[in-house]
Each structure stands twice: as structure tokens, then as C-alpha cells.
Amino acid sequence: MNIEEIKYLNVAPDGKIGKSNNTIRVNGGFVMSHSEGGCGVRGCHCSDGFWVAVLKPRTPGGVVEGLKVRFQDKKEMAMWFVI
């Protein structure tokens, strides 16, 4: 398991990050990925692997911060969460 702080800058009110097509949740919350296939869009790797993230709401200055916990595999994640 690896725990890291995450911080996204220049996040628009709709969640778009900078000039990219990437988006993030802006109201805060808990998000999880528990699949080897990621989000399912061909060629996208936005949510590969097994992880959970707790995000704070976007600040008026366009910053979204939080914590992300990455697991080695489904077995390790299952020790902490029912998946």
C-alpha cells in the first residue's frame, strides 16, 4: 500500500483540469477504482489499478487536494475494503 497527497491546480468549476480534457470531482468526496481495466475508454489510463481517494472540495482559487491510497492488487485492497 502506498499513501500519497494529491493536488490539482487550475481546476475549473466544472472539474476540467487546466487545458486538458481530464476532469476531477469538485464537490469533494470518496472515489475508488477496483479494476484492471481502468475507466473503460480505449487507450485511457485515468483510473488503472486498485486505489481509493478522498478529495476535498475545490477551493475558489481552483485547487483540489486530497489523499490517494494505491494497492498492489485486488487482494491487498480487499483486506481494507469490500470489493
Image: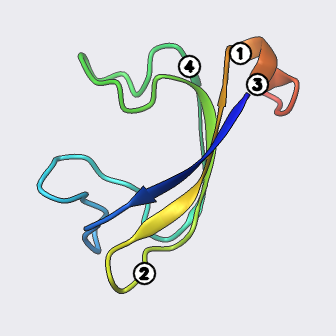
Q: Quadrant of residue 43?
A: top left
Check disc 1: other Cα within 10 Å, few if <14, some if 14-19, many if 20+. some
**What's the colour scheme?**
rainbow
Name the residue beneath numbered marker 4: 35
Q: Viewed as shown, does residue 49 lie left or right of 38? A: right
Name the residue beneath numbered marker 2: 59
Q: In which quarter of the image is residue 77?
A: top right
Name the residue beneath numbered marker 1: 74
Evaluate if marks 1 and 3 touch, with contact meaning CB atoms under 8 Å apart: yes
Q: Viewed as shown, does residue 64 lie left or right of 68? A: left
- For the point 57% across and 59% down, the residue is 66
Check disc 3: other Cα within 10 Å, few if <14, some if 14-19, many if 20+. some
The picture places residue 16, in percent across and down from the top left corner, at: 24, 59
Q: Which numbered disc, 3 or 4, marks the residue closer to the eye?
A: 3
Q: Mark 4 or mark 2, which is nearer the start of the sequence?
A: 4
Name the residue beneath numbered marker 3: 77
